[in-house]
Image (spheres, helix red, strand yellow):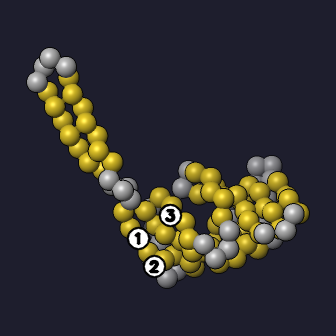
Amino acid sequence: MKYAIIEASGKQFWVEPGRFYDFNSLNVEPGDKIALTRVLLINDNGNITVGKPCLDNVKVEATVLGHLRGQKVTVYKMQPKKKTRKKQGHRTNLTRLLIDNIIN
């Protein structure tokens, strides 16, 4: 099984070829091919390589499937004994990427 741990959008993701993942909004168009170069670890059928902190000459190729919005998060603030209530909702903008290949 081939997988990699990458850093993108301020988070770390365990990615495998052929699967899609949702990242924080990226400034790319649907259908574009991008390369993610901040690869922290790669496992190539039991051969594990760890970077310090990143691996050189290793990249993850991905295709942008589209942009979407995440689940709604409800924020409710209140001040006890003051009759102050505030309810807000928030949805994060996401970009869905299909992992095509891990090149090492």
Frontmost of labels 2 and 3 is 3
**Farthest residue in the right direction?**
47
- On the image, the x and y values in percent for residue 79 come to 20, 23
What is the C-alpha distance between the residues marked 1 and 3? Answer: 9 Å
- What amino acid is at disc 1? His
- What amino acid is at disc 3? Asp
Where does label 2 land, which residue? 30
Q: Which SS class for mark 1?
A: strand
**Count of all numbered marks drawn on residues in the image:** 3
What is the C-alpha distance between the residues marked 2 and 3? Answer: 13 Å
Residue 82 located left or right of residue 17 = left
- On the image, the x and y values in percent for residue 97 come to 54, 71
What residue is shown at x 67% (from left), y 74% (from top)?
17
Residue 32, above or below 8: below
The C terminus lies in quadrant: bottom right
Residue 53 located left or right of residue 35 = right
Q: Could you tell which of marks 1 and 3 lies nearer the N-terminus? A: 3
Residue 84, above or below 95: above
Q: Could you tell which of marks 2 and 3 lies nearer the N-terminus? A: 3
Q: Residues within 10 Å of mark 1 (few under 14, many from 20)?
A: some
Marking on residue 67: 1
Where does label 3 land, which residue? 22
Q: Which SS class for mark 3?
A: strand
What residue is shown at x 20% (from left), y 40% (from top)?
87
Q: Quadrant of residue 46?
A: bottom right
Evaluate whether residue 9 shows in this view: yes
Q: Which SS class for mark 2?
A: loop
Q: Could you tell which of marks 1 and 2 lies nearer the N-terminus? A: 2
Q: Nearer the viewer, residue 54 or 88?
A: 88
